[in-house]
Every structure is written in structure tokens, then in C-alpha cells.
Amino acid sequence: MNKFAGLLIVISSFLAAQQKMSLVECEEAFQKNNLQLLAEQYNINMADADILQAKIWELPQLSGQINAYNPEGRKIFDAGHAKGAQVTQLIYMGGKKKNEIAFAKSNKELAQLQFSQLLVDLRSQLRSAYFDLYYEQLKLENTEKQLGYMNDLLAAYRVQSAKGNVSLKDQVRLQSIVIQLNNDKIEINKNILGFEQTLKVLTGIAEDIDPQLSDAEAKDLLAAQPFGDETELQKKALENNADYQYNLKLIDNSRLYAEWQKSLNVPDLNLGAGWDQNGGTFKNEINLMVGIPLPLWKSNKGNVEKANFAIQQNQKNADFQKLTLETKVQAAYKTWKTQYDQLTEIKPADLNNMEMVYNGMLSNFRKGNISLIEFTDFMDSYRETALQIYDMKNQIIQSAEQLNQLVQTKIFY
């Protein structure tokens, strides 16, 4: 009784460690808990702080003087007869502040685009791992079903082989299939563990996630068709891909930076007012103070040239990114189309026939209507075909996800 209770506890613990979740629930947990996403958000907050900082002017300067030594009265620190004070403020000329603020705002737009691209990339990883896990679990279920039957059959043949009723060669032939199925199971379980770990990191959920995807939903995903051909998809990608938009925005950003650097060549104005008790022409005189550097040379010439080169560099990078994005979309579309056409060649009736033949072979082998060689050859072929079909279905969905990641707008219906 105690052993039975202990077994129930172990089973309950295993079930509790798994969490059944739909894809939508996983995406919600991802946006709420993903640490990379939360960390990237701070770049936008820091960009806001940079804008705030760019709007702040230099503080006014207050200075004063008092007499250190009065030679007429031979008095030290004669503050009663000689003192003065000045207040000055730096006045930015040439639109420096306006350009600095515009550059800071452009940096925020870049930070937002970087966040958008990270969101797309991580969500794509999440969806990819989710579908990978779903199909690996189906492969595991199918493999365990075959393995259960073959293990029972092998155990029976071992008994009969020991009695001399069947040959050792037949037992070894069955053993070979069991070994292959076990190897498949080990590899599938290894893949499942990796996908579970990926989902844990992306969603921030400690339990193993069990994908909840109905057969109807899976069929809808496989049957989904993209809007338009590869040319239309390329156009949409150029309009919506955050990574490409980032490179375009970087050109504008470098132009704004160049304008800011040019404006730094314009001398600033120091404007102020001063009071002097006895040191001027008049007693207690108030003076207007104006100061400006002499523009004998452009003090920021090197940075201006560097900024202009950055504009040209970012333009070339954007051209490269455009070509790369168009090529990737074209390749992803062709990959999806090839895989989709390949799967559609396999009709539902063909899959039903394969299962009917599988069940028929099991039944006829039990009745002794077919030989062991025929049976094992069929089982080996069925094992490989079953795994390949699951992989084909998964690859179609993965190809569609890659297109979604590149185009970054709704393209499947």
C-alpha cells in the first residue's frame, strides 16, 4: 500500500511539473516574463533620458570679486569700498540645441526599432520551439506505440528461441528493429528536452510546457497560404522589417548627427551683467557683458568630415540590407512552396492507407499469414516514413514562420 501511495506521489509530481499551454498563452507569458525583452526596454527609457538631457542648458555662471589689498588705506580685504559681481549665461548659437535634441529623438526611434526586431526574433524562436516540441511529441508517441508492440514480440521470440521453436536469426532481426526504435526514442527525447529548455527561457516558466494544439488547428496551419507571390512579399518586407527600417533610419540619424556637428562650428555667445562698486568709471555701475570666441578656424572640422563619411557608410549598409532581405524572402518563399507542394502530393487517403496497411500487417503477422522477413522489412520502412511525415509537416510550419519573421506583417490566411 505504501509503495502504491509513493507511486501516486511520483506521478503527481511529474504531472505538476508540466503545464499545458496554447501558443497564445506562451506568447503572453513571453511578453510578460522574457528577461531579454525587459532588458531591451530600458534602452528606450535611456533614450528618453538622453532627450531630456539634450534639452537642458548650461547653468548660469555667478562670479564676484572683492578687494584683496587697498594700497591707499593700506588695508587688507577692504570689502567695504571695493567689490563687484557678474552673472553670465552661455547662449547656444547656430541651432546647436535644436540639432542635439533632434539627434537624441532619432536615437530613441532607433532604440524602438531595435526593440521591435528583438521582439520579432524572440517570438519567432518561441513559435519555432513550440511547433518543434509539438511534432517531436507526436513522433515520440508514434515511436513508443511501435516500440511497445515490438518489445512484446521480441520477448515472445526470446522464449520461443530458448525452446528451439524459432531461430536465433529471427530473434536478432527483431532485436535490430527494437534497437533502431530505441535509438529514435533517445534522439527524440533529447530534442524534446532542448525545446522545453528553450521555451522555459523564453517564457520565464519553470515547468515543462506541453503544447496544446488540436488536430484541426494543426491542419489549418499546414493549409495556410501567403498573400501574393515572392515579389509582393519582398515589397511588404521592405515596408515592415524592423531590421531594414533600422538601417534606413540610421541614414537619417547620421545626417542629423552631421548637422549637429556642423552647428558646433558656430561660436556660442556668453551674455551677462556685472556690478562694480568702485572699480569702474562710475560708482555702483552695472555693465552688460558679451563674449564670443573668435572663429579663426573651424574647431569641429574633423568631426564634421567623420559624420559625412558615416552617412555614406550607412547608405551602403542599407543597400546591402535591402538586397539581403529581398534574397532571404525569396529563398524562404521558395523553400515553403517546395515543402508545401511536397506534402500536398501525399493525400489524406494515402496516410489512411498507410495506417490500414500497418494494422493489417500486425494482424496478419499474428495470424501467421506473412513471414518475419516481410514483417520486419515493412516495420522498418514504416518507422522511417512515419518520422519523415512528421518532419515534413513541421518544416512547412517552420518555413512559414521564417517568412513571418522576415516580412513582419500578416501574410498567411
Image (cartoon, grey):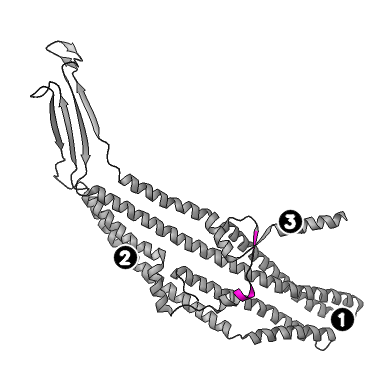
**Magenta extent:** 208-217
Which residue is nearer to you in this view: 154 or 238?
238
Residue type highlighted by circle 3: Ser
For label 2, count other residues whose C-alpha is less than 10 Å away and answer few (under 14), some (14-19) or many (20+). some
For label 3, count other residues whose C-alpha is less than 10 Å away and answer few (under 14), some (14-19) or many (20+). few
The residue under label 2 is 316
Q: Say which quarter of the image contains residue 289.
A: top left
> How much space separates mark 2 and mark 1, taking CA atoms?
74 Å
Which residue is nearer to you in this view: 162 or 154?
154
What element does badge 1 sit on? Answer: loop
Residue 209 part of the magenta segment: yes
Q: In the rendered view, would you say 351 is above or below 17? A: below
The residue under label 3 is 13
Tell whether 71 sits left or right of 393.
left
Number of numbered markers: 3
At x 66% / y 80%, what residue is drawn? 385
What element does badge 3 sit on? Answer: helix
Tell whether 407 sits left or right of 259.
right
The residue under label 1 is 166
Q: Are marks 1 and 3 in contact (CB under 8 Å)?
A: no
